[in-house]
Every structure is written in structure tokens, then in C-alpha cells.
Amino acid sequence: MRVLIIDDDTTFCELLAETLEGKGIEVEWTTDGFGGYEMSLDQPYDLFILDQRMPLVLGSELAEYLREDNPEAKIILTSAFADETLGDIAKSIHSPLLSKPFAADRLLELIKRLLSRSRNHSKLAKT
């Protein structure tokens, strides 16, 4: 599995990458929202983890750009400022929202759920 983390906080990216790599997940990360979008065009990723508040682009906007190129993209939105409004935005773009800080186990369970839902959907499409 390949994950791309896009968050303007270097320390957060490093810690998240370390956590995921410890579970055998291949991780790349960037603190540049538009640079992350460019990375997504160069290589396929199974999952994107996007911070909502970044300079120049919101994570929810970036999610829409990513889905234009890949409608089935699995995206998790994160924010230290998660509120009901942001929750509604996350629902409208079909992405779960994790409020920072969050436990690694919560993230890993969410990833597992997103990917298993994807596999189940693929199986149904083939029948």
C-alpha cells in the first residue's frame, strides 16, 4: 500500500510516516499542497492523508482536485480545527475527518475500513 501525506507541519508528517511505515506501509509526504498534487500525477497512491488548513490550498479543495483525476481516490482529511462545518464539508466530499491530535490506532482502523470498503466495492462490481 502506498500513502501520500500532505500537511504543512513537517513534524506531523514525519511522525505519521514513521507510524505507517512501522506497519509496512510505503509512505511519501510533502508540506506543499500543490507539490503533493503534482506527486499524485506522477505516481499512483492507494490513500491520501490531507491537512485541511495549509497555505495556498485547503485540504478539501485538494481532495476535489485529486478526485478529478481519480474519482475512486481514498482520502482522509485531518484538522486541528475540526468542527461541525468542516465535518459537513468532509461528508460532502466523501472523506472521513480526523480531529488532531488523534491516536495512531484510530488512523490505522480508519485506513483498514476505507480499504476494505474499496475491496468489497470492487468485488461487487465484478459480480
Image (cartoon, rainbow, N blue to C red):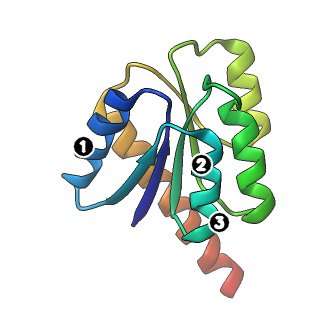
Residue density around tag 3, few if under 14, some if 14–19, many if 20 or more, within 10 Å: few
Query: Mark number for residue 86?
Result: none
Closer to us: mark 2 or mark 1? Answer: 2
* Nearer-N-terminus badge (3/2): 2
**Toward which corner of the image does residue 83 lie, by quadrant?**
top right
Q: Which residue is mark 1?
A: 19
| Residue type (three-letter) at the residue carrying disc 3 | Leu
Left or right: 125 with respect to 98? Answer: right
The answer to whether 34 is drawn above or below residue 104 in the figure is: below
Q: Secondary structure at mark 3?
A: helix
The Cα atoms of the two marked residues, 2 and 1, are separated by: 23 Å
Closer to us: mark 3 or mark 1? Answer: 3
The answer to whether 89 is drawn above or below residue 31 in the figure is: above
Left or right: 126 with respect to 18? Answer: right
| Residue type (three-letter) at the residue carrying disc 1 | Thr
> What residue is shown at x 71% (from left), y 35% (from top)?
60
Q: Are marks 3 and 2 in contact (CB under 8 Å)?
A: no
Residue 107 picture location, percent across and down: 38, 39
* Nearer-N-terminus badge (3/1): 1
Q: Which residue is mark 2?
A: 35
Query: Mark number for residue 41?
Result: 3
The Cα atoms of the two marked residues, 3 and 2, are separated by: 10 Å
* Nearer-N-terminus badge (2/1): 1
> What residue is shown at x 35% (from left), y 45% (from top)?
108
